Amino acid sequence: MMDSFDQALTEEQRLMRQSCRSFVDQAVIPFLREEWQREWQMEPEGRLPEGILKAADEIGIRTLGVPARYGGTELDPENEVRSFALIAEEIARGDSGLADKLVQNWKVAVLLRNLAPEHLQERWFTRLVENPSFLFAHCLTEPKGASDRWLPYNVPEAAMDTRAEHIDGGWRINGRKHYISNGYDAGLYVVYANTRPGSGMLQGTSSFLVPRETPGLEVVRCNETIGCRFMNNGEIYFSDCVVPDDHLLSEGAALSKAAVYFRPGKIIQAAKNLGVGVAAFERTAEFVQTYERGGKLLIKHQVVASRLADMATRIAAIRSLLNQAALAVDQRSGDADALCNMVKVHASQEILGVCQNAVELHGGMGAMLDVGIEKLYRDATIFLHMDATVDISHFKIIKAMFPETAGAYAGPEA
């Protein structure tokens, strides 16, 4: 299934994929098989061993996108998003939660190198490179608004509830963020807040760098999710949390500036989906060619062969759309917004079907925690709403394709 795909890769990409595949096969998959119970620990600090992140660091994938002058791993800018996707797929083939942890670092690194002043890049990229456990987090979602805000419905009623007020020498932040990837563990947060009450979201939203140790920032809980449990999703309160003036990344136009984060994010999300689907397919293909029922191998039963073919076809179709969308984002094509949302939503729906087939073809074993097939299905259910829900993504596709006639999809028509 990968022959034609391989031919399209650069030599650098082939080497990166080989390194990632070896890391997953030698470190991640054995850990999951031997210590599957750790996923269910209710003390999130102890779920993923520090050694896994150190091993990821050794092959240079924890600091992707960080400028080489700070010790990071730079990618060819002409292929950066495609390379992100390639690596994310391989890591998620091992574990999607681990991929989530690493992906946040990559995406925030791209944002910081575009928006942060040089002295702050040096400070935080250096800390990231020096500490294998250091993580970034991107704080957008709030209890009263999430992906519905990114249509955008550009009116004051849709504005952030988190507020930031300018004071002498800095900004005072008050509010709450939840469902934040890496939120429980991160050492540095990019926080979005309303700085112009009464303005629309696109004119009144600003972004800030907020270190974890800042007084007034409190990580209040780890959200216990059904899947992707090796990434600790968190909830954060800000109570008179003050950051200096230079920690303002973008004033007023933060959401439009964050396109450098959002577009690659959709591609990487689809790639993580794909990695989970590939894992489900590979393990199911091995199973049905090893186990016998009714006196013959499972694969020789027509219904099993049909299901396996369906899984392979869905994966191949997603890979094709993913490559097209990633190329569009790398080349900044006019159809990039539509395509990156298309592949995000399509992958989330199709991979759930792939994983359902995997569970059913494994029979009773598919439901056993210690086998790990049900884990792939649980992880896939999370993808439907990561990086925007399915319906909101559909609205954004139409807005990108038909900007003059698409509806507002929230509140009265303009």
Image: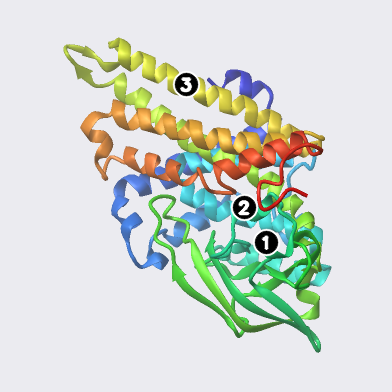
Report the residue marked by disc 1.
158
Residue 123 position within the rendered picture, expressed as x and y whole percent measured from the top left? 73, 72
Q: Residue at x 70, y 41 (%)?
A: 81
Q: Which residue is labeled 3 in the image?
A: 312
Residue at the (74%, 81%) spot, across then down: 165
Horizontal and vertical percent for residue 369?
Answer: 27, 45
Vertical side of 240 occupied by 292: above or below: above
Question: How far is disc 1 from disc 2 in space, using C-alphas?
Answer: 9 Å
- Label 2, on which residue? 148
Quick one: which residue is furthest to the left in this view? 295
Q: Tell me whether the residue at label 1 lies in contact with that at label 2, contact meaning CB atoms closer than 8 angstroms.
A: yes
Label 1 element class: helix
Q: Residues within 10 Å of mark 1 (few under 14, many from 20)?
A: some
Query: Does any portion of residue 315 appear in the rendered image?
Result: yes
Out of 174 and 283, give the one closest to the viewer: 174
- Above or below, comparing residue 292 to residue 73 in the picture: above
